[in-house]
Image (tube, rainbow, N blue to C red):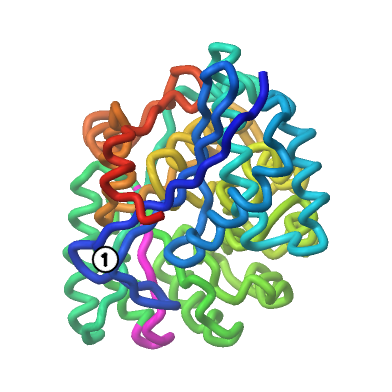
Amino acid sequence: MKITRMQSHVLQYDLPEELGYSQQYYARRTAHLVEVSTDEGITGWGECFGPGPIAVANKGIVEGVIAPMVIGMNPMDRDVIWHKVYNLMRDHGQKGMPMQALSGVDVALWDIAGKVMGQPIHNLLGGAHRSKVPAYGYGMMLKRESVQDHVARFEDEVAAILDMGFKATKMKTGLGPEADVQLCAAVARGVEGKGRFMVDANHCYTTSDAFYVGRALDEMGAYWFEEPVAPEDRDGYRELRAGLKTNISGGEAEFGRWGWRDILENRGLDIAQPEVCALGGITEYQRVLALCHAHFTPVVNHVWGSAIAVATNLHLLAAMPPLPGGLFPWEPMLEFDTTHNSFRDELLQDSLNIQAQVSQNGGYVSVPKGPGLGVEPDREFIQKYVLT
Protein backbone atom coordinates (compact mmCIF):
# COMPACT_ATOMS: atom_id res chain seq x y z
CA MET A 1 0.00 0.00 0.00
CA LYS A 2 1.25 3.47 -0.88
CA ILE A 3 0.17 7.05 -0.20
CA THR A 4 -0.90 8.57 -3.51
CA ARG A 5 -2.37 11.92 -2.52
CA MET A 6 -2.65 14.34 0.38
CA GLN A 7 -5.26 17.10 0.26
CA SER A 8 -6.30 19.83 2.69
CA HIS A 9 -9.90 21.02 2.90
CA VAL A 10 -10.22 24.37 4.67
CA LEU A 11 -13.87 24.99 5.55
CA GLN A 12 -15.42 28.21 6.78
CA TYR A 13 -18.80 29.82 7.45
CA ASP A 14 -20.18 32.94 9.10
CA LEU A 15 -21.39 32.38 12.66
CA PRO A 16 -24.91 33.48 13.61
CA GLU A 17 -23.35 35.85 16.15
CA GLU A 18 -19.91 37.16 17.02
CA LEU A 19 -18.12 35.34 19.84
CA GLY A 20 -15.01 36.18 21.82
CA TYR A 21 -12.46 35.11 24.36
CA SER A 22 -9.71 37.00 26.11
CA GLN A 23 -7.57 37.41 22.98
CA GLN A 24 -10.03 38.31 20.21
CA TYR A 25 -13.57 38.38 18.84
CA TYR A 26 -14.41 36.23 15.84
CA ALA A 27 -17.39 35.99 13.49
CA ARG A 28 -16.41 32.94 11.38
CA ARG A 29 -15.77 29.31 12.19
CA THR A 30 -13.03 27.44 10.37
CA ALA A 31 -12.01 23.79 10.15
CA HIS A 32 -8.97 22.29 8.43
CA LEU A 33 -9.47 18.67 7.35
CA VAL A 34 -6.71 16.52 5.86
CA GLU A 35 -7.52 13.70 3.44
CA VAL A 36 -4.87 11.07 2.71
CA SER A 37 -5.53 8.70 -0.22
CA THR A 38 -3.87 5.37 -1.05
CA ASP A 39 -3.41 3.17 -4.11
CA GLU A 40 -5.77 0.58 -2.56
CA GLY A 41 -8.69 2.99 -2.37
CA ILE A 42 -8.56 3.43 1.40
CA THR A 43 -8.81 7.06 2.53
CA GLY A 44 -7.99 8.51 5.94
CA TRP A 45 -9.18 11.75 7.53
CA GLY A 46 -7.44 13.99 10.03
CA GLU A 47 -7.68 17.52 11.34
CA CYS A 48 -5.23 20.36 11.95
CA PHE A 49 -5.76 22.78 14.83
CA GLY A 50 -5.82 26.44 13.83
CA PRO A 51 -8.51 28.88 12.67
CA GLY A 52 -8.85 31.33 9.77
CA PRO A 53 -5.59 32.42 8.12
CA ILE A 54 -3.68 29.88 10.24
CA ALA A 55 -5.65 27.08 8.57
CA VAL A 56 -4.92 28.50 5.12
CA ALA A 57 -1.21 28.71 5.91
CA ASN A 58 -1.22 25.17 7.30
CA LYS A 59 -2.78 23.94 4.07
CA GLY A 60 0.38 25.13 2.34
CA ILE A 61 2.52 23.12 4.75
CA VAL A 62 0.41 19.97 4.36
CA GLU A 63 0.28 20.03 0.58
CA GLY A 64 3.51 21.86 -0.28
CA VAL A 65 5.92 20.59 2.36
CA ILE A 66 4.72 17.33 3.94
CA ALA A 67 3.03 15.68 0.95
CA PRO A 68 6.19 15.58 -1.24
CA MET A 69 8.06 13.96 1.65
CA VAL A 70 5.63 11.06 2.11
CA ILE A 71 3.81 10.32 -1.16
CA GLY A 72 4.85 6.83 -2.19
CA MET A 73 5.44 5.69 1.39
CA ASN A 74 3.44 2.99 3.17
CA PRO A 75 0.73 4.72 5.28
CA MET A 76 1.06 1.97 7.89
CA ASP A 77 4.57 3.21 8.68
CA ARG A 78 3.17 5.94 10.90
CA ASP A 79 6.14 6.33 13.22
CA VAL A 80 8.63 6.26 10.33
CA ILE A 81 6.63 8.95 8.53
CA TRP A 82 6.29 11.03 11.70
CA HIS A 83 10.02 11.14 12.35
CA LYS A 84 10.94 11.71 8.72
CA VAL A 85 8.64 14.73 8.51
CA TYR A 86 9.59 16.10 11.93
CA ASN A 87 13.33 15.75 11.31
CA LEU A 88 13.12 17.46 7.92
CA MET A 89 11.02 20.32 9.34
CA ARG A 90 12.96 20.63 12.62
CA ASP A 91 15.16 23.52 11.45
CA HIS A 92 12.04 25.48 10.54
CA GLY A 93 9.85 24.90 13.57
CA GLN A 94 9.74 22.35 16.38
CA LYS A 95 6.47 23.92 17.53
CA GLY A 96 3.52 25.82 16.10
CA MET A 97 2.18 25.53 12.59
CA PRO A 98 4.52 22.81 11.24
CA MET A 99 3.39 20.58 14.11
CA GLN A 100 -0.27 21.48 13.56
CA ALA A 101 0.08 20.43 9.93
CA LEU A 102 1.84 17.18 10.85
CA SER A 103 -0.92 16.45 13.37
CA GLY A 104 -3.65 16.34 10.74
CA VAL A 105 -1.60 14.06 8.52
CA ASP A 106 -0.82 11.71 11.40
CA VAL A 107 -4.47 11.40 12.49
CA ALA A 108 -5.40 10.51 8.89
CA LEU A 109 -2.75 7.77 8.87
CA TRP A 110 -4.22 6.27 12.03
CA ASP A 111 -7.64 6.34 10.40
CA ILE A 112 -6.21 4.43 7.44
CA ALA A 113 -4.53 1.90 9.75
CA GLY A 114 -7.79 1.21 11.55
CA LYS A 115 -9.61 0.71 8.27
CA VAL A 116 -6.90 -1.64 6.98
CA MET A 117 -7.06 -3.73 10.16
CA GLY A 118 -10.83 -3.48 10.57
CA GLN A 119 -10.41 -2.08 14.08
CA PRO A 120 -11.32 1.21 15.80
CA ILE A 121 -8.37 3.40 16.73
CA HIS A 122 -8.85 2.76 20.46
CA ASN A 123 -8.18 -0.93 19.80
CA LEU A 124 -4.97 -0.06 17.95
CA LEU A 125 -3.95 1.91 21.06
CA GLY A 126 -4.41 -1.13 23.29
CA GLY A 127 -8.14 -1.27 23.92
CA ALA A 128 -10.86 0.75 25.62
CA HIS A 129 -10.73 1.32 29.37
CA ARG A 130 -14.22 2.81 29.03
CA SER A 131 -16.94 2.60 26.38
CA LYS A 132 -18.44 5.98 27.24
CA VAL A 133 -16.95 9.28 28.36
CA PRO A 134 -18.50 12.04 30.47
CA ALA A 135 -18.66 15.38 28.64
CA TYR A 136 -18.51 18.92 29.92
CA GLY A 137 -20.13 21.80 28.08
CA TYR A 138 -18.34 25.07 27.60
CA GLY A 139 -19.89 28.33 26.51
CA MET A 140 -20.28 31.70 28.19
CA MET A 141 -18.08 33.46 25.65
CA LEU A 142 -17.20 37.14 25.71
CA LYS A 143 -19.13 39.73 23.68
CA ARG A 144 -19.03 43.47 23.09
CA GLU A 145 -21.33 44.26 26.03
CA SER A 146 -21.16 45.62 29.57
CA VAL A 147 -20.04 43.64 32.59
CA GLN A 148 -23.62 43.65 33.88
CA ASP A 149 -24.90 42.23 30.59
CA HIS A 150 -22.20 39.55 30.71
CA VAL A 151 -23.25 38.57 34.23
CA ALA A 152 -26.92 38.28 33.28
CA ARG A 153 -26.14 36.30 30.13
CA PHE A 154 -23.71 33.95 31.91
CA GLU A 155 -26.42 33.20 34.49
CA ASP A 156 -28.79 32.23 31.67
CA GLU A 157 -26.19 30.25 29.72
CA VAL A 158 -24.94 28.17 32.64
CA ALA A 159 -28.53 27.18 33.41
CA ALA A 160 -29.09 26.21 29.77
CA ILE A 161 -25.90 24.10 29.64
CA LEU A 162 -26.87 22.20 32.79
CA ASP A 163 -30.35 21.71 31.38
CA MET A 164 -28.74 20.06 28.32
CA GLY A 165 -27.54 17.28 30.64
CA PHE A 166 -23.91 18.29 31.18
CA LYS A 167 -22.61 17.68 34.70
CA ALA A 168 -19.81 20.23 34.36
CA THR A 169 -19.37 23.50 32.47
CA LYS A 170 -16.63 25.93 31.52
CA MET A 171 -16.73 29.70 31.09
CA LYS A 172 -14.44 32.31 29.56
CA THR A 173 -12.88 35.29 31.33
CA GLY A 174 -10.88 38.25 30.05
CA LEU A 175 -12.70 41.47 30.92
CA GLY A 176 -10.24 42.28 33.71
CA PRO A 177 -9.66 40.71 37.14
CA GLU A 178 -12.42 42.49 39.08
CA ALA A 179 -15.04 42.09 36.36
CA ASP A 180 -14.00 38.48 35.82
CA VAL A 181 -14.59 37.65 39.48
CA GLN A 182 -18.15 38.92 39.04
CA LEU A 183 -18.61 36.63 36.05
CA CYS A 184 -17.21 33.65 37.94
CA ALA A 185 -19.48 34.34 40.91
CA ALA A 186 -22.53 34.31 38.61
CA VAL A 187 -21.55 30.91 37.19
CA ALA A 188 -20.69 29.52 40.64
CA ARG A 189 -24.17 30.44 41.83
CA GLY A 190 -25.68 28.75 38.79
CA VAL A 191 -23.89 25.40 39.28
CA GLU A 192 -24.16 25.20 43.07
CA GLY A 193 -25.34 21.74 43.98
CA LYS A 194 -25.68 20.74 40.29
CA GLY A 195 -22.15 20.14 39.02
CA ARG A 196 -18.66 21.50 38.53
CA PHE A 197 -17.52 24.68 36.85
CA MET A 198 -14.19 25.54 35.27
CA VAL A 199 -12.68 28.86 34.21
CA ASP A 200 -10.66 29.43 31.01
CA ALA A 201 -8.62 32.65 30.88
CA ASN A 202 -6.79 31.90 27.60
CA HIS A 203 -3.57 33.21 29.21
CA CYS A 204 -4.77 36.79 29.69
CA TYR A 205 -3.40 37.51 33.21
CA THR A 206 -0.15 38.46 34.81
CA THR A 207 0.74 36.20 37.72
CA SER A 208 -0.45 38.74 40.29
CA ASP A 209 -3.81 39.21 38.53
CA ALA A 210 -4.15 35.44 38.21
CA PHE A 211 -3.68 35.14 41.97
CA TYR A 212 -6.42 37.74 42.50
CA VAL A 213 -8.88 35.77 40.38
CA GLY A 214 -7.60 32.41 41.60
CA ARG A 215 -8.10 33.22 45.28
CA ALA A 216 -11.71 34.13 44.50
CA LEU A 217 -12.10 30.83 42.65
CA ASP A 218 -10.76 28.99 45.70
CA GLU A 219 -13.66 30.36 47.70
CA MET A 220 -16.18 29.58 44.94
CA GLY A 221 -15.06 25.96 44.57
CA ALA A 222 -14.00 26.08 40.91
CA TYR A 223 -12.66 22.76 39.65
CA TRP A 224 -9.87 24.17 37.50
CA PHE A 225 -8.35 27.48 36.37
CA GLU A 226 -7.26 27.04 32.75
CA GLU A 227 -4.36 28.87 31.11
CA PRO A 228 -4.25 31.63 33.76
CA VAL A 229 -0.95 33.04 32.46
CA ALA A 230 1.06 32.91 29.23
CA PRO A 231 2.23 29.41 28.26
CA GLU A 232 5.83 30.63 28.31
CA ASP A 233 5.49 31.69 31.97
CA ARG A 234 6.59 28.40 33.54
CA ASP A 235 7.43 30.09 36.84
CA GLY A 236 3.98 31.67 37.00
CA TYR A 237 2.31 28.30 36.58
CA ARG A 238 4.44 26.75 39.31
CA GLU A 239 3.76 29.63 41.71
CA LEU A 240 0.00 29.51 41.06
CA ARG A 241 -0.17 25.77 41.56
CA ALA A 242 1.69 26.05 44.85
CA GLY A 243 -0.37 28.99 46.07
CA LEU A 244 -3.96 28.13 45.09
CA LYS A 245 -6.37 25.36 46.04
CA THR A 246 -8.08 25.37 42.63
CA ASN A 247 -6.50 23.00 40.09
CA ILE A 248 -4.26 24.70 37.54
CA SER A 249 -4.68 23.36 34.01
CA GLY A 250 -3.12 24.10 30.64
CA GLY A 251 -0.90 22.86 27.84
CA GLU A 252 -3.04 23.26 24.72
CA ALA A 253 -0.37 25.60 23.30
CA GLU A 254 2.50 23.14 23.81
CA PHE A 255 3.90 20.86 21.12
CA GLY A 256 5.66 17.52 21.21
CA ARG A 257 7.28 15.41 23.89
CA TRP A 258 10.15 17.83 24.46
CA GLY A 259 7.98 20.82 25.29
CA TRP A 260 5.74 18.66 27.45
CA ARG A 261 8.75 17.24 29.28
CA ASP A 262 9.68 20.78 30.35
CA ILE A 263 6.11 21.60 31.49
CA LEU A 264 5.80 18.44 33.55
CA GLU A 265 9.22 18.62 35.14
CA ASN A 266 8.38 22.18 36.17
CA ARG A 267 5.43 20.81 38.23
CA GLY A 268 3.14 23.70 37.25
CA LEU A 269 0.02 21.75 36.27
CA ASP A 270 -2.56 19.84 38.23
CA ILE A 271 -4.34 18.83 35.00
CA ALA A 272 -2.72 18.53 31.55
CA GLN A 273 -4.67 19.53 28.44
CA PRO A 274 -2.84 18.32 25.31
CA GLU A 275 -4.35 19.15 21.90
CA VAL A 276 -3.89 16.13 19.61
CA CYS A 277 -4.63 18.12 16.44
CA ALA A 278 -1.74 20.48 17.25
CA LEU A 279 0.98 18.71 19.25
CA GLY A 280 1.91 16.15 16.59
CA GLY A 281 -1.09 13.86 16.12
CA ILE A 282 -1.95 10.56 17.77
CA THR A 283 1.59 9.21 17.40
CA GLU A 284 3.06 12.03 19.47
CA TYR A 285 0.05 12.30 21.76
CA GLN A 286 0.77 8.79 23.04
CA ARG A 287 4.26 9.88 24.06
CA VAL A 288 2.91 13.01 25.74
CA LEU A 289 0.28 10.97 27.60
CA ALA A 290 2.98 8.61 28.85
CA LEU A 291 5.01 11.57 30.10
CA CYS A 292 1.97 13.03 31.88
CA HIS A 293 1.17 9.77 33.59
CA ALA A 294 4.83 9.22 34.47
CA HIS A 295 4.53 12.51 36.39
CA PHE A 296 1.15 11.43 37.86
CA THR A 297 -0.55 14.34 36.11
CA PRO A 298 -4.17 13.64 35.03
CA VAL A 299 -5.11 14.46 31.43
CA VAL A 300 -8.26 16.12 30.07
CA ASN A 301 -7.71 16.63 26.35
CA HIS A 302 -8.25 20.03 24.81
CA VAL A 303 -10.86 19.59 22.05
CA TRP A 304 -11.62 22.22 19.41
CA GLY A 305 -12.77 21.85 15.84
CA SER A 306 -14.90 19.56 13.73
CA ALA A 307 -16.42 16.13 14.24
CA ILE A 308 -13.09 14.62 13.12
CA ALA A 309 -11.38 16.16 16.15
CA VAL A 310 -14.21 15.05 18.44
CA ALA A 311 -14.09 11.46 17.17
CA THR A 312 -10.29 11.37 17.49
CA ASN A 313 -10.49 12.49 21.10
CA LEU A 314 -13.21 9.98 21.97
CA HIS A 315 -10.85 7.19 20.93
CA LEU A 316 -7.98 8.69 22.92
CA LEU A 317 -10.10 9.17 26.03
CA ALA A 318 -11.40 5.61 25.74
CA ALA A 319 -7.87 4.22 25.53
CA MET A 320 -6.51 6.38 28.38
CA PRO A 321 -5.60 4.21 31.38
CA PRO A 322 -7.03 5.24 34.76
CA LEU A 323 -4.76 7.33 36.95
CA PRO A 324 -3.84 6.22 39.55
CA GLY A 325 -6.43 3.42 39.41
CA GLY A 326 -8.70 1.86 42.04
CA LEU A 327 -12.36 1.09 42.51
CA PHE A 328 -13.39 4.66 41.78
CA PRO A 329 -10.59 6.14 39.63
CA TRP A 330 -10.31 9.72 38.45
CA GLU A 331 -11.91 9.88 34.98
CA PRO A 332 -11.16 12.13 31.98
CA MET A 333 -13.87 14.21 30.29
CA LEU A 334 -14.68 15.19 26.72
CA GLU A 335 -14.60 18.94 26.12
CA PHE A 336 -17.67 20.05 24.13
CA ASP A 337 -18.22 23.53 22.72
CA THR A 338 -21.92 24.36 23.09
CA THR A 339 -21.74 27.32 20.67
CA HIS A 340 -22.82 27.01 17.02
CA ASN A 341 -20.63 24.52 15.11
CA SER A 342 -21.90 23.10 11.82
CA PHE A 343 -18.53 21.44 11.22
CA ARG A 344 -19.14 19.26 14.23
CA ASP A 345 -22.89 18.72 13.98
CA GLU A 346 -23.42 18.42 10.19
CA LEU A 347 -20.08 17.29 8.70
CA LEU A 348 -20.50 13.53 9.00
CA GLN A 349 -22.59 11.10 6.98
CA ASP A 350 -23.83 9.83 10.36
CA SER A 351 -23.65 12.51 13.06
CA LEU A 352 -22.16 11.77 16.46
CA ASN A 353 -25.16 13.57 18.00
CA ILE A 354 -23.15 14.55 21.07
CA GLN A 355 -25.78 16.80 22.63
CA ALA A 356 -28.50 14.21 22.18
CA GLN A 357 -26.26 11.58 23.78
CA VAL A 358 -25.49 13.85 26.72
CA SER A 359 -29.18 14.51 27.27
CA GLN A 360 -30.21 10.87 26.98
CA ASN A 361 -27.25 9.19 28.71
CA GLY A 362 -26.80 11.17 31.90
CA GLY A 363 -24.00 13.37 30.56
CA TYR A 364 -22.06 10.58 28.79
CA VAL A 365 -20.99 10.10 25.15
CA SER A 366 -20.34 6.71 23.53
CA VAL A 367 -17.05 5.93 21.81
CA PRO A 368 -17.27 5.15 18.04
CA LYS A 369 -16.90 1.44 17.28
CA GLY A 370 -16.30 1.46 13.52
CA PRO A 371 -12.89 0.93 11.87
CA GLY A 372 -10.42 3.78 12.19
CA LEU A 373 -12.07 6.92 13.47
CA GLY A 374 -15.43 5.25 12.94
CA VAL A 375 -16.80 8.30 11.12
CA GLU A 376 -16.89 9.49 7.50
CA PRO A 377 -17.32 13.10 6.29
CA ASP A 378 -20.04 14.03 3.82
CA ARG A 379 -18.25 15.21 0.67
CA GLU A 380 -21.18 17.32 -0.46
CA PHE A 381 -21.06 19.15 2.86
CA ILE A 382 -17.32 19.74 2.42
CA GLN A 383 -17.84 21.19 -1.04
CA LYS A 384 -20.54 23.50 0.28
CA TYR A 385 -18.23 25.11 2.85
CA VAL A 386 -14.76 24.72 1.34
CA LEU A 387 -12.77 27.93 1.43
CA THR A 388 -9.70 26.68 -0.35
Expressed as whole percent of the image width and height from the top left, the position of residue 330 reads: 55, 39
Q: Secondary structure at mark 1?
A: helix
Q: Is residue 259 visible?
A: yes
Q: Specify whether 95 is left or right of 212.
A: right
In the picture as drawn, the residue positioned furthest to the top comes out as 118
> Mark 1 is on which residue type?
Arg
Q: In which quadrant of the rendered view does residue 153 lie?
A: bottom left
Quick one: label 1, few (<14), some, or many (20+) residues within 10 Å? Answer: few
Give the labeled residue for mark 1: 189
Q: Position of residue 10 (x, y in %)?
A: 42, 52
Range of residues picked out in magenta: 168-179
- 44 sits to left or right of 254: left
Q: Height in image: 329 above or below 236?
A: above
Residue at 27% over, 41% down: 345
Where in the figure is residue 177, as x and y percent of width and height? Answer: 43, 85
Residue at (61%, 30%) from the top-left corner? 4
Residue 384: image location, x then y, percent = 26, 46
Q: In the image shown, does 353 or 207 lie closer to the viewer?
A: 353
Q: Residue 30 or 265: which is nearer the viewer? A: 30
Note whether residue 169 is visible. Answer: no
The vertical placement of 309 against 126, above or below, is below
